[in-house]
Structures are given as structure tokens and as C-alpha cells.
Amino acid sequence: MDRKLLNTNWIWLPDWTPEDAADARIVYFRKEFAVNDDSLSVERKIRISADSRYKLYVNGSFVQEGPQKALNLKEWYVDSADIAPYLVSGVNVAAVEVLRFAAGQNDSLYCSDSPCLYVEDAPGTDDALSGKSGWKCMLNHEIRIFGEEGRPAPIHAQEDVCATDFFSGWKLPWYDAAAWKDAAPKMILSISRSDAPYNLLPRSIPTMRHESRHFAEIMNGSKRFAVLINRDEPISIPPHTKEVVELSAGAEECGYLLYAFAGGSGARVSTLCAECYAYPQPAQPSPLGGTVPTQPQKGDRTDTVNGQLCGHTSHYTVAGYGTPLAPECYEPYWFRTFRFVRLEIETVNEPLTILRFSYRSTGYPLEMKTSFCVSEPTYAPIWDISVRTLARCMHETYVDCPFYEQLQYAMDTRSEILYTYAVSADDRLARQAMEAFRCSQRPDGLINADAPTVKSNVIPSFSIYYLLMVYDHMMYFGDKALVKRHLPAIDGILAFFDRNLAENGMVGKIGGPIMRHERWSFIDWSRKWDSGVPTVTQMGSGAITMESLLYLYGLQKVSALAAYADRIGLAEEYTRRAAALADAVCKSAFGCREGVRLVQDGPGLDEYSVHCQVFAVLTGLVDPTEGKEMLATTVGNPDLAQASVAFMFYLFRALEICGWYEKTNELWELWRKMLHDNLTTCVENDTDARSDCHAWGALMCYEIPAVILGVRPAAPGFEKAVIAPQMGALTKAAGDVATPKGMVHVEWTRTRENRCEVKYLLPEGMTAVQV
């Protein structure tokens, strides 16, 4: 039997070693193929995937990247790529860069034990690009991928490159690949169709957008770089010269930096990417000995006089083979997040000509549909930084922050999903997120706090935010099959909390501060709490009332989910459990402060926070009148734990329910300060402002369409819409709001009698419930 008949379309290096597998490696693949004139007008598609990542080029032009991040180690994603627009008559070349991470090296990327590239021609074509034969490959030893400060990729995923002319032009047809190896196809008997990466699923989200951009201005350094960034005119740096320049993109960006050089053999180009100018602080002693870096202080993000750029640095040593007509080009494999970039260029014996330095912006192709105008002038710039923040935190998954972890956390993601619905009515990335969390479920019933991820990180409350995502999707899109798919996982989550009820009927101690308990009982980044965990976890029984309130809120929402899925008995069970839990909280966790009845942070403990009062309102433990009194007593009280940016969404909802929405105009001061400090995106929190771009802060993306214009679903699938504008401190507002049923136009004015006079126009098939 001819062994070639057993070849598959999965290929890899023939001499891959254990040493290669122990670290991140970049492997190049190329294949030449002929195309005649008659084929140029015909659609030409291939299927492509890789473990871990690929970038596809045809005749030197970038086509796309992928695959979509796997959600587990049983299934993998495969992409479809249309290469017809890049083909020419005669010889063509397909080139693929594959980045293979070692197991556990990248927190958000699963890696199987089978590194591979998969390429297959679409049915009906000539099979010219399928992986079974004809592909050449070569490991690139010139690139070292590393994590700064000992952190794993993608946190500080950097590159140190010492380039040579060996790979010059390797993506083009004229390149001589005689020294390359023949790629080795995997044999059909050596793969398992039930496991990753061989169990292939079609991509569920669109490919990422890619847009060419130039830097906007020079912040520090030689002004002669202006001709490079403004007009793409080359600049030359003499031999034995060190030159430093700091550039601004104009706003926070995610993108692939693009370099083009001529000459300059041995020149070293160091690139630091930063979110802002900040004020570095001395390192602090470590309890393990030595010192640890201290988070820089932040103020005016554009303070070039007193501030410094603090960020992540990569290095590129120029080979020197480039010419103006055939430049030496470099593009880091992983996208960078930056608002400012510091280039430090040091030449040796030859002058270096920089022909181009720009970037290709990337991210999820979010289509902004909602628009508005309101009477408060600061709301528009807050909207602008919020929209930009949301867009920068959307890639193949939602991410907490693009500058650091790039992980999809459940609490963050629930808010990001609602913001996405409100501005675009797009649920494709939301479906990915819900499936990622469902697949992360642990034996105890809880989900991982972030997903997809290769590491365990358990925050009990984050499981509730996952089920809220499913509830939100039901209300916006009405997909009963999706609800039924997630209900078993949701039931497992609720069962965990039910198993952990204490004798008083509330949730007992199930976690603690980070790294000091198997579960991290994070609630919010309040200044008064250790690692976001209420102080009461170290007092009394250690039980945290917020975990009971979140469980209660989850039971109430899942009762509606179960009823929608025709699981009436289950819905009734959840309703009974919710009633019993509400009764237990009322009996065990109410105290008094300043003559006002308040919910305690822990049952029987004289500790209070804004958070428990907010969820007392959201769960209906108190009526709106009493809820307003509770919020008035706690919000802004310096003696009590306050809500940070992360929790503001829920505080705003409680204020709305209590008829005190005008209070939010005062709370927007936190965002006005962001504008005052010259941010272009929303900070992670108002405590240490670690990240300058964190999408739970993009709250205005929800408040304008869903609350100020007042357009929200009143029945599953948006069959009915609530048109209930909240005037707050405004006198008028108007806008168009995206919904899955189409655009809703709303305009309103405040009358002399302080009433809201509303006009609206609905898409066909939608009815309105005006409140």
C-alpha cells in the first residue's frame, strides 16, 4: 500500500525536538503553485488552522490570522480563507507563519500535544494547497519570544529578534527555498478525530479587522521623525548614533507595528509600548525577599515633562539587507497595545534608513449603530472614550484589558456583552463567551473565573455573572435552543451554592482573599477591601452576604430562563429556593446604622458597604423607597466600602429602580476626571488605575441607549420594548438605538411640570411598553 495515501492535511516540521517544544517557536511554511489566467476570476478558498496560531500570506500580502481561540482540548476551530484576490497568473506562493506556544506558556491559548498546520483546498478545486504534499518548512531561530518580568505570554509578550538575510523575501515566489525541509504530513492512524486539534469546528465569529494607520504626533525627541509618520518619507540615522523618539497614536490602540529598513546592519531598534506617561515609584520589599516592582502613579496621561513611559519593550537587530525598493521588513507576531511608543535606535558601522514605521490596527469588527445627542455636554466625550474602550477590549474573545492579561473574565464580560448589544445588537462574540464559560465548568459546578484559559482561577460570584449573560441573551435575542444548551451548566452552578448553605440558610464561607484560599471571593476593587474581598471574610463565620445576594439574584433570573425553556417544574423550584434565601437574608443580615436599616456585609456583623444595599434593591429585598434611603446613607460615605468602576453598572441600576437616577450625574465625575487626566479610554478602577483601558468602565455605552433613551427588551427576543427614558439631570435627549429587531428612534424633553414627554418610532414587528 502506498503510504502517501495515509497522509493527512496536518503537517509539521520533520525534526521537531523536545527542546523545540519547551518554548515558544515560530515556524515558517511555504508552498508554490501555478495559476492560469482562466482561474483568476474564480473563487478560491482554503480551510486553514494551526496549533497554536497562524498568519496567512499570499504573494507577500497579508490575508488573515487565526484560528479562533479553542475553548477546550477536545475541539479546535478551522477558518475559511478566500485567497482569490491575491493571486496572479503564473507562479504564486502561499506562506504561513505559525506561532507554537509551549503548554501553559500562554494563559488564554490551549496547546495540544500535536503542533501542526492544517491546510485543505475547498472541494472542487485542484488540491494545489492541501497539506498532504509540497509544503516546505523552516524553524526561525532568529526570533525569541519572552515575557517581561517573568510573566507568561500574552502578559508582556515580547520579541527579541536578531535578523539575518536568510528569510529575506520568503513570502514571495522568487525566494530560493532549497535549504528548507519538506513538511511532514501526519499519518491518518496517528491522529484522533475526537480530540484537538483534529476535531475541527467552523469559526463562530468573524475574522478580525485590519486597518492601516499612521502615528499622529511626536511627543518627545527629534522632530525630523515627523516626515516619516506624516508623509512616509524616509529618515536616515548616521553610524554610531543613538536616537530616541516618543510617538503618539492619538488614542489607545491595538495593532501590529510595521517596520521597514534599508541598510543599517547591526543597528538595534528597541520599541517600548505604553498606555500613558506615568510617575514611576520605588520598588517595594517582598515578603519572599528582595523587592517587587511598584505600580507607577498616574495623573495627566500626556505629562511629558514630569512623566515617563512605562510599558513593555521588544528588540530588533537589523540584518542590513534592505534597500528602498526591497526593504527589510519586520512585524511582531502578537499585536501590541499602545497609545505611546518609544523608539530607541542605536546604529553601529552603517547608517540606518527607516523607510516606514506605522501599524495595522486590529480587533473585533464591531459595527457601531447607536447614535444620540443629549443636553449634558460632557456625556458625548465620555461616550467617545467608552466606545473606544469597548472596541479595544473585543478581539477573538472579550478581554479584561488589552495591555495586560487579555483574558475573558465573567464579571467584565457580562457588562461588555450588554454594552455590545446596546451599541450594535451583535451577539456573535457573546455566544463565544457563553460557550467558553460553559466549557470551563469544574467538577464542583462552578465555572472558571476566566475562559478560555489553561489555568484555574475560581471566583464563586463570577459564575453568577455567566448565568446573567444567558438571561440577557434570552431577553435580547430569544434563542430557546441556546438557553436549553446552558441550563445544565447553570443548574450545576446553583447546586454548588445550595450545597454550601449554612445553618442560617445563607451561603456560608466559600472563599477568601486571593492566593490565601482555594477560591477568591472577589466582589469589587473597593479601597477598604483586601484584594477586592469584603473584610468580613476574616470575621465571624467568614460568610460574605454579597455571595448570598448574588446567588439570590441568580435564582431569580434563572427561574425566568427555566420557564422560557418550558422547564416549569425547575422554574418553580428556583422560585422556592429564592424565597427561602431571601427570608434567610432578612432574618440574619440586616442591621442598623445612623437610624437606617442596612444589609450587613456579613450576617450579624456591624460592617456595611454600598454593595449589599445595591443588591438588596436589585433582588427586591427592599422596596424602592427604603432602597433609596439605604443608598443615600451609604453612597459616598467615607467610612463604608464604596463601589469602584467595576461595580458602577449595578449601582446605576439600583439608583434607577429607586427613582434617584439624577444621582448618576454626580457619579459621572469619575469619568469626567478621566477626561481631565487626558485619557482616551476608561480606567480599570479608580484605586490604582493599573490599566488605562478596561471595558467594564465603558458604562456610557449602556446608559445612553438603554436608560437615558430608555430602550430595553420587555419580553424575550425583544418582541416588546420598554421605552422608559430616565431624565436624570438632563433636559432633553434624542437618538437611534440598535436592537436585534432594527433601529428604535427616541426623542424626549423635560416639561415645565418635570415630566418626560416622549416620542418614539419602532421597527416593524416590535411593540412598545411605555413606563
Image: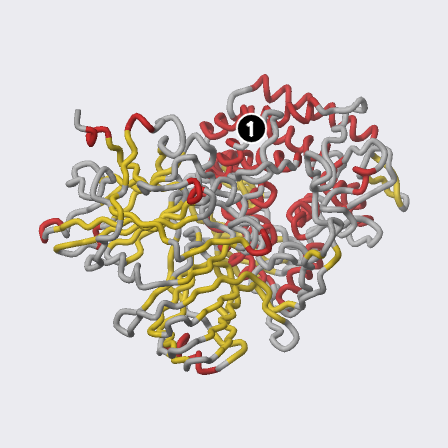
User: Above or below — where is 723 with respect to 352?
Assistant: above
Where does the image place residue 169, in percent across and percent down from the top left?
27, 61
**330 and 525: which one is in front?**
330
Where does the image place residue 281, in percent across and percent down from the top left?
70, 65
Q: Amino acid at mark 1?
A: Leu
User: Which SS class for mark 1?
Assistant: helix
**403 and 376: which one is in front?**
403
Left or right: 204 as drawn, with respect to 686: left
Q: Residue at x 36, y 75 (%)?
A: 232
Residue 296 in which image quadrant: bottom right
User: Above or below — where is 551 with respect to 702?
Assistant: above
Where does the image place residue 549, in percent across and percent down from the top left?
72, 34
Residue corresponding to mark 1: 561
Quarter of the image containing the N terminus? Answer: top left
Examine the rendering and report whether any part of residue 740 can be seen: no
Where does the image place residue 111, in percent across and percent down from the top left?
45, 39
User: Above or below — where is 156 with respect to 124?
Assistant: below
Q: Residue at x 81, y 39 (%)?
A: 536
| Image label count | 1
Furthest-top residue in this view: 569
Left or right: 206 as drawn, with respect to 289: left
